[in-house]
Image (spheres, coloured by chain):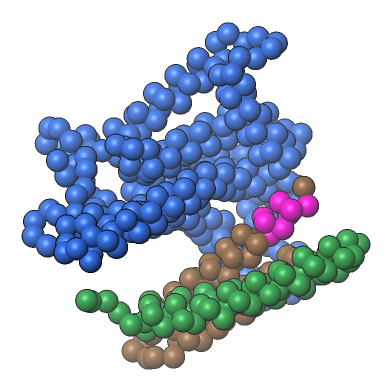
Chain colours: A blue, B green, C brown
Amino acid sequence: MRSLFRLSGEGEGFVPPSSNDFELPPVFGDNAFTTKPILLVFLSVILVSVFFLLSSRKAAVVPSKLQFAGESIYSFVRNDLGRDIIGHEFMRFVPYLFTLFTFVLTNNIFGIVPFLQFPTMSRVSFPYVLAVFTFVVFHYVGIRKQGIVKYLKEIMFMPGVPKPVYILLTPIELATFFLVRPLTLSLRLFANMFAGHLLLLVFILGGEHLFQGVLGLKLISPFAFAFGIGLTFFEFMVQCLQAYIFTLLTALYIAGALADEH
Amino acid sequence: MTGTLNLVGYGLSAIGPAIATGMIFAAYISGVARQPEARSVLQPIAFLGFALAEALALFGLVLAFVL
Amino acid sequence: MAMKDEGNALWSIFGYLLSGMLFWGGVGYGLDKWLNQGYFLLVGLLLGIGAAIYLVWLRFGRE
């Protein structure tokens, strides 16, 4: 049961939510590949594919409701994230940005969908992999555009600085481009999802536990539940925002690698 | 209860840079809103102020984990 | 887009400060462990902050 749901009264007394709640045993079988987050990733891939296949199958000039929904998400990514930031070469990157945005958004929103209720990105390996994709894409684009020597030279050497200062500045530039950028990209997403899920667990499990107490505590528990519901809506906002920021930063990095001077 | 008091100290010390960043951008936004052409003058100042305030916050973060 | 320029700049500034502090602070920490001293870490952190703020000034501060 613990691999799918979490109740406050496991064992004896109140077990406060902790990082243990994110390490779920496998749903079936006895290996590391059938845990809930992995099943959710597969579910999200199926959901996203089915939704966009259905919404684009019968494309008409006067769109149906489904087609309109699909097209507004697509045009949001294409215009606001692709065209406005990357510039005239943006069409090459729209498929990647669009896949990234819908995938991260669906997996984030799983955190508040009833019965699923686990944001996949709160396991840190998933954001790591996504950040590695972005890392490879934006460096590859920059190297293809400018050649490896010129690209590295532009990253490492800031113009208009006396020579000895490069000893101080070049390691910082290298660390920023090759370590801190992918790391902050993935950790921002992970930390937001982790903290959000923990927050919801605290309020909802706390409310459940208070409800099992004496009469006075029973009276308090509705407030904890109400706060939990309010925070669920807040979480929805955070989840959309984080998917947006992840894609936005990817687009910005690609734009920076494409630009001739930065 | 277990844990380290360093993180409580870091939480307290992060209040300062947080307020500072807020004030810097409040002033920057109202400056640009009143006089949009002053933007190119104000922008470097705002960014440098942000960098200084943020440096203190990060300094506290590093020291909270190292000390 | 003007607003996105600023958002980009803010994340870059944060990245520069963080990596300056991590790199030179890491060097200082290593020297401390190696030479059994206690002050290289602080020197490294201050150096990293200084260099990172200088870099921010070079990139965003000058006209």
Query: Is C38 placed left or right of B23 in the picture?
Result: left
Query: Is C48 placed left or right of A121 in the picture?
Result: right
- Placement of the N terminus of chain A among the 4 image quadrants: top left
Vertical placement of residue A209 versus C62, above or below? above
Q: Main secondary structure of the magenta part?
A: helix
- Placement of the C terminus of chain A among the 4 image quadrants: bottom right
Residue at (65% x, 9% y) in the render: A60
Residue at (39% x, 42% y) in the render: A112
**Observer-nearest of B27 and A49:** B27
Picture coordinates of residue B11 (x, y %)?
A: 44, 77
Picture coordinates of residue A58 (x, y %)?
A: 58, 8
Q: Answer yes or no: is residue A153 visible.
A: no
Q: Quadrant of residue A140?
A: top right
Q: Quadrant of residue A196?
A: bottom left
Residues in magenta? C2-9
Picture coordinates of residue A73 (x, y %)?
A: 60, 30
Q: Answer yes or no: is residue A88 visible.
A: yes
Residue at (23% x, 60% y) in the render: A218
Picture coordinates of residue A261 (x, y %)?
A: 76, 52
Q: Is residue A230 magenta?
A: no
